[in-house]
Amino acid sequence: METQVCIFRPYLDYMPTISKIRKDGVIQKFHLSPLRPQIKELYSQGLSSRKVADKLGISHVRVLAILKNENVDRRSVTKTIPNKEFEALTPERAYIFGVMCGDGCVFSGIARKKNWKYSLYVVHLSVKDRDFIDEFVRCIKSVYGFSPSIYYVKRSQKNPKWSNIWVAKITRKEVYEDLSHYKFGTKNWRVPTEVIRSHDEKVIGAFLRGFYDSEGSASKGTRGFSISICSTNKEGLNEIKELIEILKIKSSKIGINDRPSHKLFYFTISNKAGMNIFLNKINFSIKRKYDKVRKHLKWTE
């Protein structure tokens, strides 16, 4: 006796279907998921498509397909800049420019997460002084309207000669696109044109403070105490010197320190009159550097 197998599919019995006609005239039927209303509702509440998939226990691909079939407009995964006036040249924006000519960096690339590839856009600053990071974060928030991610890296555990560092990181494409328009980079950075053309001493001073926080130092050498600045980029350093002169600060000629791997260019401020103007119009955000100059000038708080 032949046995008949009965396949019971209650799940499919109540699933609505739609029909589509292919180009060759064949009619195809498609079952519509009963989860459609939940997916649309959760997505409209602000959950990402991935979080909707995790919440309902289904694949992300399925969620994307349902949103597409339901003609739901996908939200952009790119986070926009809250402050739409971010291009205005303020002292805070000038400070960011100064940092990007120094220790800051801007880069893009391709990142991977499991089997998923995506474009990565990064603005990054890593330094050992917390007050430096705090000032950079304050300026980023003032200019763009949000705060970067901040974390602390204990590098000394791997190598005692390395300093532990503070890191500020921004992964928003719009911020990357804004800053990547400028010429930044260790060997070929240049002072942004709007800073050079600015007649606002606060803007010029803030830019220089960002650069001196990155590349400047205050110390006592064989020839006495001085505030020095150095870079492998002589053309950029010439522009820094021109800005210093706009603020009526006298400085030395640009010197060369030949190193085995590269040439390092530098100049110094060693006269007390220049240092007083420096502290009044530029200054350091880094307290340990500021304290050295203040102590030398015998400033009192």
Image: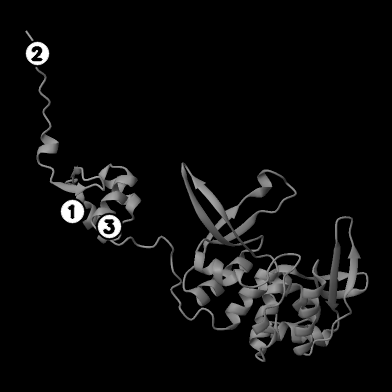
> What's the mark number on residue 275?
none
Q: CA distance from mark 2 to mark 3?
A: 48 Å
The residue type indicated by label 2 comes to Thr
x%, y% of residue 209?
69, 77
x%, y% of residue 213?
70, 71
Helix, strand or loop under label 2:
loop
Q: Is residue 119 in view from this perspective?
A: yes
Quarter-of-image position of residue 107: bottom right
> What's the mark number on residue 37?
1
Q: Residues within 10 Å of mark 2 (few under 14, many from 20)?
A: few
Compared with 294, 65 (above or below) is above
x%, y% of residue 292?
76, 73
- Mark nearest the camera among 1 and 2 is 2
Q: CA distance from mark 1 to mark 3?
A: 10 Å
Q: Are marks 2 and 3 in contact (CB under 8 Å)?
A: no
Q: Which residue is mark 2?
A: 3
Q: CA distance from mark 1 to mark 2?
A: 41 Å
> What's the mark number on residue 43?
3
The residue type indicated by label 1 comes to Pro
Along the line of sight, the residue nearer the viewer: 102 or 133:
102
The residue type indicated by label 3 comes to Tyr
Along the line of sight, the residue nearer the viewer: 133 or 173:
173
In the picture provided, is 288 more to the left or to the right than 21?
right
Q: Earlier in the sequence, mark 1 or mark 2?
A: 2
